[in-house]
Amino acid sequence: LAIAMQILACLSAVFFRWMESTSLIAEAQSVWEMWVISFYWVLTCLSTVGFGDIFPLHDVTRIYSLVVMVFSIYMNVYLLSSGIAPALQKGVIQQKIDEKKAKLAAVLQFYKVPWGLQKQVCTIYPNVLEASMHDMQEVSELPEYLQEQIYTHIKLNLLHAVPLLKNASDLCQATIATRMTRILVPPAEYLMRQDEEGDCMFFLVR
């Protein structure tokens, strides 16, 4: 964005100094002053402020101004979609998670579930919700054969990151991927203890 604005400012200086002899840009006494005024004009266009103190009088500068205006539309749409939209989406997801938490808490209280068990549920449930909301909510709506292919691809990506399996054949990695299962481990629970003999491999994904 900064590079694009810099290029537009330089082009504005060239067009207005060449075609608009009475504009503020053409009357600038130094290169620095000309660049500052050009950058100011570009920013007023991109921000849709448009004070009108610098305006085109010839066809060439008018066409150039139209190009800048069209670019400003796309730039503003891009900034809104990449900045505000994810924040709004995150807010919606968090709201859904909070609603599910509240419903679960009401169910536990209604059936008078012991506090110790409630504590375990409250510890692990947010992680389950977050994983389902962010990772696999959309995938779970696909046909099963597509889900299986996507899950296999995700598992293969994990296997590719393991140095031990880096040189393994595609068939070997695919076989391992089909046997991998996903488990959710609550905090403070041990996967293995010291001196225990292991018979499996764990990939820790947070």
Image (cartoon, rainbow, N blue to C red):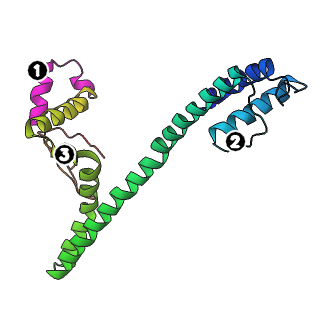
Give the side of residue 78 with respect to residue 2, left or right: left
Q: Residues within 10 Å of mark 3 (few under 14, many from 20)?
A: few
Over which residues does the magenta segment extend?
Answer: 162-179
Amino acid at circle 3 = Asp
Crowdedness of circle 1 by 10 Å Cα count: few (<14), some, many (20+)?
few
The mark nearer the N terminus, 1 or 3, is 1
The image shows residue 86 at horizontal and vertical percentages of 42, 47
Q: Which dot marks residue 50?
A: 2
Determine the residue positioned at 35% across, 59% down: 94
* Image quadrant assignment for residue 202: top left
* Horizontal and vertical percent position of residue 102: 27, 72
Please provide percent x and percent y for residue 35.
78, 27
Instruction: Locate residue 61 relative to residue 204 in the image: left or right.
Output: right
Looking at the picture, which amino acid does disc 2 mark? Answer: Gly
Q: Mark 1: which secondary structure?
A: helix
Asked if 106 appears above or below 83 in the picture, the reply is below
Up-down relation of residue 35 to residue 151 (above or below):
above
Q: Give me the disc on residue 171.
A: 1
Front position in the image: 58 or 141: 58
Q: Which residue is mark 3?
A: 195
Mark closest to the chain's N terminus, 2 or 1: 2
Location of the N terminus (image quadrant): top right
C-alpha separation, residue under disc 3 versus residue under disc 2: 73 Å
Distance of label 1 from label 3 (alpha carbons): 33 Å
